[in-house]
């Protein structure tokens, strides 16, 4: 199962340059650093923000007081030299020279592949930079406006040469000031998207598609109406993905997705889509809501991306501190589907720098948290094999704390695992009936994978009434049962 590790490429290379006392580009990353990236349990690296950034977009950002305020909040000593413009304001899908250019990315891909890792990069289907070549060479790829539009809504339109274009947007927020809106209904734009993604697929093993739901026919029509022209019969990704996969059959498609459109995007060709609902429920809802969420079809769940943070969300150490964050990490790490980890998450970073910045503040490493993740990632890789199944904890009359517990199993031919998470700030107890009838008649050992503890239990009890668990607030079990721990039970004596 895919385990993604997101790296802010510009910030990372800047820190490596300071660490080694010389400029470091993608083609010059030392071997020991790639070894650090290739931690056990990770199989895919997302180098976020490798494409050419826009000088025009940078000028707009430098004049935006709201953006400048966010930069100062994240990095109080920020200077103009620390601001590079947004990686999602793409001037061209060519690796930026400051990062090592296409040759540097090719070296990075080889280094990752030699360690068994795939490379994922970004693709932005909804908008481009105001100085992208298409504005002059292919204006039909974009949503255009009129002088009246510009006079009426100067924040929503901009003039480039003798043409007026709509600024990029989603339907629920004001337009983004530094980007221009692509027309997802344009047949020529769809062909150009295929060509661009084929070229990206020549350089990487996968793409993370920014705001992937925005070009979908229904969403795009509701956002742009008649300005986009008639909706094509075929949906955007249904057109694009098969044509790209004709050239790159194994290219991994990952969608940033919201508004409960994950299943629709999976049906249109995406391998994985963000599970933002689970993220929100872990932060703001209780175990019952999470259990209901996990009752979805297993095939759908295998196509989701579970995460606690990424470059768009606050740092997990700030929103889910201490034992609560560790419990949530165990949950996302051991569920079916893809898992997304964010560089700095393991070290307990609390400041999320805006993606415009090339530098972030120095923060102390949370050594106990890093040690926890050093145990969790290989344990999760060991656990997530075979068939996943959610379990239902039961409780004694008068004790409703069993409702605070989340539980599931993984069953493989050679191993069985049980995960239990107390998703609450209360001590909680439950019985958890295990789904393995062949435990009957055996003494069983349950070994904790995150600690050195183990427990011997009677197999008959484990199946009915079930394993008794008593967990303190936010405590977890990650337990392994293996056939070698099930000797035949002899006579009682």
Image (cartoon, helix red, strand yellow):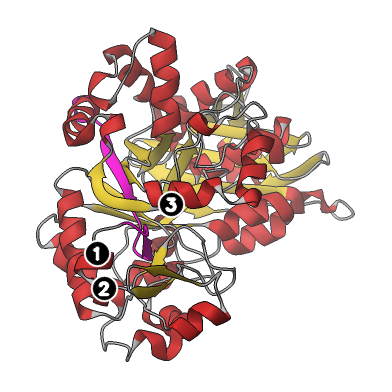
Q: Give how far across and how far down residue 200 sits, in percent.
A: 20, 50
Do the residues bearing badges 2 and 3 touch, measured as CB atoms within 8 Å? no
Query: In the drawing, does residue 441 fall left or right of residue 492?
Result: left
Q: Is residue 147 visible?
A: yes
Q: Give how far across and how far down residue 438 sits, in percent.
A: 45, 44
Label 3 element class: helix
Sequence-first tag of 2 and 3: 3
Q: Which residue is mark 1?
A: 134
Do the residues bearing badges 2 and 1 touch, measured as CB atoms within 8 Å? yes
Q: Residue at x 68, y 61 (%)?
A: 289
Whole-number angstrom distance, CA of label 1 to CA of label 3:
15 Å
Per the rendered image, the range of residues in magenta is 113-131
Q: Is residue 464 visible?
A: no
Above or below, 464 against 415 in this view is below
Query: In the drawing, does residue 106 fall left or right of residue 255?
Result: left
Sequence-first tag of 2 and 1: 1
- Give the label on residue 57, or none: 3
Q: Which residue is mark 2?
A: 139
């Amino acid at each position: 199962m895919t385990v993604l590790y997101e790296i802010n490429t510009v910030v990372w290379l800047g820190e490596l340059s300071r660490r080694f006392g010389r400029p470091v580009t993608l083609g010059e990353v030392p071997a020991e650093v790639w070894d650090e990236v290739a931690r056990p349990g990770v199989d895919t690296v997302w180098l976020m923000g490798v494409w050419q950034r826009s000088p025009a977009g940078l000028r707009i950002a430098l004049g935006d007081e709201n953006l400048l305020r966010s930069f100062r909040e994240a990095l109080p000593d920020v200077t103009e030299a620390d601001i590079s413009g947004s990686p999602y304001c793409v001037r061209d899908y060519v690796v930026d020279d400051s990062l090592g250019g296409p040759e540097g990315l090719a070296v990075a891909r080889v280094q990752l592949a030699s360690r068994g890792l795939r490379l994922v990069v970004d693709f932005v289907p909804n908008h481009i930079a105001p100085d992208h070549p298409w504005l002059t060479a292919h204006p039909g790829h974009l949503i255009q406006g009129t002088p009246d539009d510009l006079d009426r809504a100067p924040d929503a339109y901009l003039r480039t040469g003798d043409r007026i274009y709509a600024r990029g947007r989603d339907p629920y927020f004001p337009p983004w000031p530094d980007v221009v809106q692509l027309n997802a209904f344009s047949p020529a734009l769809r062909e150009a998207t295929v060509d661009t993604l084929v070229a990206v697929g020549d350089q990487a093993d996968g793409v993370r598609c920014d705001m992937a739901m925005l070009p979908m026919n229904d969403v795009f029509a509701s956002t742009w109406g008649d300005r986009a022209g008639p909706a094509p019969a075929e949906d955007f990704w249904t057109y694009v993905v098969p044509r790209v996969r004709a050239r790159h059959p194994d290219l991994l498609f990952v969608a940033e997705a919201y508004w409960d459109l994950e299943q629709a995007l999976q049906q249109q060709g995406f391998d994985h889509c963000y599970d933002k609902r689970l993220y929100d429920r872990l932060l703001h809802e209780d175990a019952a809501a999470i259990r209901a969420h996990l009752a979805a079809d297993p095939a759908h769940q295998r196509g989701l991306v579970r995460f606690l943070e990424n470059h768009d969300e606050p740092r997990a150490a700030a929103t889910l501190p201490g034992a609560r964050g560790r419990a949530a990490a165990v949950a996302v790490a051991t569920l079916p589907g893809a898992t997304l980890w964010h560089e700095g998450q393991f070290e307990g970073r609390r400041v999320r720098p805006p993606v415009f910045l090339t530098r972030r503040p120095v923060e102390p490493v949370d050594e106990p948290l890093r040690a926890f993740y050093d145990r969790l990632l290989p344990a999760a890789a060991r656990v997530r094999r075979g068939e996943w199944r959610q379990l239902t904890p039961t409780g004694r009359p008068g004790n409703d704390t069993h409702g605070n517990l989340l539980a599931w199993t993984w069953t493989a031919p050679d191993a069985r695992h049980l995960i239990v998470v107390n998703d609450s700030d209360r001590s909680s107890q439950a019985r958890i009936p295990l789904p393995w009838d062949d435990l009957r008649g055996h003494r069983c050992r349950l070994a904790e994978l995150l600690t050195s503890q183990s427990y011997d239990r009677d197999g008959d009890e484990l199946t009915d009434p079930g394993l008794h668990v008593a967990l303190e607030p936010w405590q977890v079990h990650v337990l392994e049962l293996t056939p070698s721990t099930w000797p035949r039970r002899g006579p009682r004596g």
